[in-house]
Amino acid sequence: MTEKRENWGSKLGLILAMAGNAVGLGNFWRYPYQAAKNGGGAFMVPYFAALIILGIPLMLCEWNQGRFGGKYGHGTLGPMVYLQAREGVKPRTAAIIGGLAGAIAFSVTVLLNGYYNHIIGWTLGYSFLSLTGGYMDKAVDTGAYFVSYIQDPTKVIIFWLIALAILGFAVMRGVQKGIEVVAKIMMPLIYVFGIILIIRTLTLGAPVKPDWTPIAGLNYIWSPRWSDLNWTSALAAAGQIFFTLSLGMGIIQNYASYLKADDDIVVSGFATVSLNELAEVIMGGSIAIPICYAFLGPEGMKSGVGLSFIALPNIFRAMGGGQLFGALWFLILFMAGITSAIAMYNYLVAMLEEMGLQKKLGSVIVFGLYIIVGLPVGLEPILTKTADLAYLTEVDNWVGSYFLVVLGLIEVIATGWLMGGKALEEMNRGGYWKVPQWFFTLFIQILTPLTIIALLIGSTRDYYK
Ligand code: PHE
């Protein structure tokens, strides 16, 4: 497993690449509709609780596993858990846990990336259509337009293949020349486009009804409504934290494995979380939700999965400069999606490399797997002539929520209990900030695993209800 070591070229490159890994469709496509659908302010309470109890501790565990495991190999969550665990437990037990985690992580990543790549393709298609005025005619029903878009094999397949080609190209060029370069270009653009769109959103006025203002939309999210708190929104919030921070798959570990042994991880881990949350609650939350509220009012909050692709186009064409602002919105989604998918692709190739395959062959195999698992997503609307995306929704439920949480549990137990005290020592090596012992004990050893177990029991119960 000691093939030639690749490293990050610069600290800035590393932070932008990690932010690119975390900031994705989760922030701009998934978060707004999850928050809106699950009661706005009622969703934000468990959301922040999950950020503190699950998000931050797990982010630290994953950076730690990655840097520690990087001495041996770049990829797999399996061997990393295995190596980390090996210090504290019998090698056989550790090998079983590591192997199992690695196998689940590989499958989960392939399946998730399989549908994720399709959504990236749609965002590229929609950027193009926004600029060229495709849905700008007020007579067009945007719902029907979306359905006809996903049922049009030429558009769907061409934009999907372009997205796949960009991914393959970046991954083949390697960590510094591929991943870092893409992140350095795309990440600043996402934040700049985001700020332009926030300003445009907040100056919309009240285009439909006097009390449907963008600020009222912000209030919908930012006034905590304790009375509406419930188990379903809590689960959705925890799932969103895993999804948006890229936790539970091993892709944070993969990027962290390119660190040097004494590179800081605590401050960098916090920087990743902060940049992601900035892009999620500030940008994701201050664009799509207030725009939707200003034009559609409280009812618009129920838009669901279609919020980005059906509700927003409706609105872009009603506002001044909509063609440009629509294109900017879909380009943000596209760039956010690409930088996350590159992380998943790189991770899968690294896993195959660790099994002894050449990088080129590994990349081709992963490309092939994407085509195979992605095809049902693309074909379903075409063949069934519906747009309910049942396959995508089912896979998203299972891998995007359930299995990420299962893997998160294995990771936190490996760090908190199998490696134990040594994990804290390892985490604090080379850092500007130190994780205090109380945080390690209270969160990583107790609260984080117990909360995940409670979530798994709760969601399993909900599923069979
Ligand atoms: N975190 C990224 C996003 O928000 C991508 C991702 C999703 C990574 C789920 C891992 C798991 O879209």
Image (cartoon, rainbow, N blue to C red):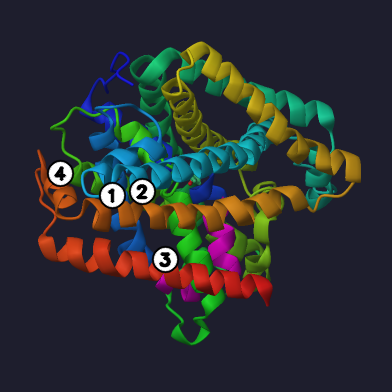
Tell me how far mark 1 sits from mark 3, CA to CA: 15 Å
Chain-order first, disc 1 or disc 4: 1
At numbered mark 1, what does the secondary structure look like: helix, strand or loop?
helix
**Is residue 20 left or right of 435 when viewed as pictured?**
right
Task: Please identify the quarter of the rendering in which residue 112 is found.
Answer: top right
Q: Which residue is mark 3?
A: 452
Distance Cα–Cα, label 4 vs label 2: 22 Å
Q: Is residue 26 above or below residue 353?
A: below
Residue 87 locus on image (x, y percent): 21, 44
Quadrant including the C terminus: bottom right
Ranked by sequence position, the earlier of labels 2 and 1 is 1
Residue placed under numbered mark 4 in the picture = 426
Q: Which residue is disc 2 drawn over?
A: 93
* Image x and y of residue 359, in percent: 47, 15
Q: Residues within 10 Å of mark 3 (few under 14, many from 20)?
A: many
Look at the image and say whether residue 350 sits in the magenta stretch: no
- The quadrant holding residue 52 is bottom left
Say left or right for 429 vs 384: left
Image coords of residue 365 (percent x, y): 60, 21
The answer to whether the residues at label 1 and label 3 have Cβ atoms under 8 Å apart is no
Which residue in the structure is indicated by mark 1? 61
Q: Quadrant of residue 251?
A: top left
Question: How far is the residue under mark 1 from the one under mark 4?
Answer: 10 Å
- Are the two marked residues, 1 and 4, in contact with CB atoms closer than 8 angstroms? no
Which element carries disc 2, helix, strand or loop? helix
Q: Which of pointers 4 and 2 lies earlier in the amino acid sequence?
A: 2
User: Can the viewer see residue 63?
Assistant: no
The part of the chain drawn in magenta is 30-48
Give, as a three-letter code, the residue at label 4. Answer: Glu
**Left or right side of 329 for 134:** right
Q: Quadrant of the N terminus?
A: top left
Q: CA distance from mark 2 to mark 1?
A: 20 Å
